[in-house]
Amino acid sequence: MLDAIVKAEEVQVNEIELTEYLIRTSQRYGMPPEQFAKQLQDAGQISQLVAEVSRTKALAGVLGRVNVVDKSGKKVDLEALRPQTPPATPIDSEE
């Protein structure tokens, strides 16, 4: 279904999105991003990574246009469900 949405809406993936996804995914596998990217490339899996990012973008687009409600009919705030990233802590450098 998501592939049909990707095609119908002509979802495109840019290099930044692909890189961010690769970094997040490599962290889940406990691997450095460079090593993870090389393994994907060696296995011929880069196109699958692009397809996964496209599906994720398509899903985000669909969810952005729909109203999700709970059992009682109350609207669910999808933004509240998004993982929160803590603010970056500045690194003190000794001079």
Image (cartoon, helix red, strand yellow):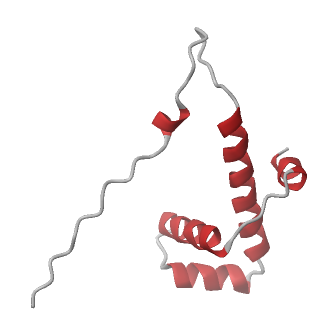
Residue at far top of view: 72
Left or right of 9? Residue 73 is left
Residue at far left of view: 95
The picture places residue 71, in percent across and down from the top left corner, at 60, 12
Q: Residue at x 75, y 54 (%)?
A: 55
The picture places residue 58, in percent across and down from the top left corner, at 74, 50
Q: Residue at x 74, y 76 (%)?
A: 46
Image position of 4 with respect to 80: above or below: below
* Residue situated in front as seen by the camera: 45 or 83: 83
Q: Which image quarter is the N terminus in? A: top right
Give the image quarter of residue 89.
bottom left
Image position of 27 with respect to 33: above or below: above
The picture places residue 14, in percent across and down from the top left corner, at 69, 71
Give the image quarter of residue 50.
bottom right
Left or right of 32? Residue 49 is right
* Residue situated in front as seen by the camera: 53 or 41: 53
The picture places residue 19, in percent across and down from the top left corner, at 59, 73
* Residue situated in front as seen by the camera: 56 or 39: 56
Image position of 78 with respect to 85: above or below: above
Q: Residue at x 84, y 47 (%)?
A: 5
Q: Residue at x 58, y 8 (%)?
A: 72
